[in-house]
Each structure stands twice: as C-alpha cells, then as structure tokens.
Amino acid sequence: MLVLQGTAPMQIGGNRNAKNITVGADGKRDWSFGLFDCFPRCSLCCQAVCCPCIVYSKNRQRLRHLQQQGAPLPGGGERYDDYCLIYSGLLILTGHAWILHIHTRTEARERYGIRGDTYGDCLTAWCCRPCSLTQERREIELEEGSFEQSDK
C-alpha cells in the first residue's frame, strides 16, 4: 500500500524585517527608515525628485519580483518600462501620477508588515513623493540585501 505524505510549504528566503525592528502587539512595525531620512541616499533622493517615474517603476518591478519569485530582481529592473511611461504621462498631463504610487506603497507596507493605512499612503504619495519613493526603495533594498547575506 502506497502512503502519500504532504510536503511542507515552500519557504521564501529573505528577511522582511532586516533591521529587526520591534513588532508591536498588532503584528506591525514602523518603516526601517523615516520618511525624511532620504538624504543619506542623496543620489536616489535626487533621482526621485528629477525622474520619479524611473524610481517608481523600479520599485514596482523589484517588489513584484520579490512577491512572485521570492528572490531579488537581477540587475534591479528595467530603467524604462510601461509603468514608467504611464507614470510620466500622468505626471506631465495631469500632475496626478501619485495615484499610481498609492497602490505600490500599500503593497510594500503590507509585505513588510508596516503600520499604516491607505489614507496615510495617499497623503504621503501626494505630499512627499520623492521621500516616499526613497523610503520604499530603501525598504526593498534591505530585504534584497538579506538574500545576499543568507547565501554566504
């Protein structure tokens, strides 16, 4: 008689709380970097000011790859893709590209178990786009870096 046994679910690598920030009773934590803590990454902050479409698109690509493949995106993603063009088009034509940004920020916040809500994501994306994009990128980079450390 053949007995089939179930296998354990696949574990996805990486550390979604690479700085080991305290998780509260609600199961949530704060961002690893403050919203206005973008200046230590001056080049990224400048890119988020001058070319937010590129930073948005790469954040989105990297986050999606982590969610779908459980590993960092090789090369950090394409510089220009459809979402970069859509974002820049909305920014130029209407000034409302921040609307796209809300969804990606919410996805990042949920992936990393970070406190907040959609209203806060909306307000942050609208008022502080460069700092918000930089904060999200730095959070994604922390997780990607934890893959490299676990490979050693």
Image (cartoon, grey):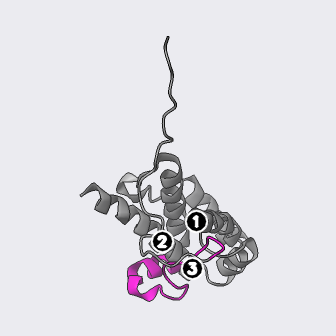
User: In this rendering, would 100 be left or right of 152?
Assistant: right
Disc 2/disc 3 C-alpha distance (Å): 11 Å
Q: What residue is pinned by disc 3? A: 30
Mark 3 or 1: in front is 3
Label 1 sits on a secondary structure element that is helix
Specify the segment rendered in magenta. 25-49
Instruction: Indicate which disc, 2 or 3, sits on the residue closer to the N terminus.
Output: 3
Q: Quadrant of the C terminus?
A: bottom left
Q: Is residue 143 visible?
A: yes
Q: Nearer the viewer, mark 2 or mark 3?
A: 3
Residue 6 x %, y %: 52, 31
- The percent position of residue 104, horizontal first and vertical second, equals 62, 64
Q: Is residue 92 among what the camera can see?
A: no
Residue at which label 1 appears:
108
For marks 1 and 2 on the same chain, the one whose residue lies earlier in the sequence: 1
Instruction: Name the residue type under label 3.
Output: Asp
Q: Amino acid at mark 2?
A: Glu
Mark closest to the chain's N terminus, 3 or 1: 3
**For the residue marked with disc 1, what is the amino acid?**
Ala
Dividing the picture into quadrants, the one containing residue 46 is: bottom left
Instruction: Say above or below: 141 vs 76.
Output: below
In the image shown, does 95 or 15 lie closer to the viewer?
Answer: 15
- What residue is disc 2 on? 139
CB of mark 3 within 8 Å of CB of mark 1?
no
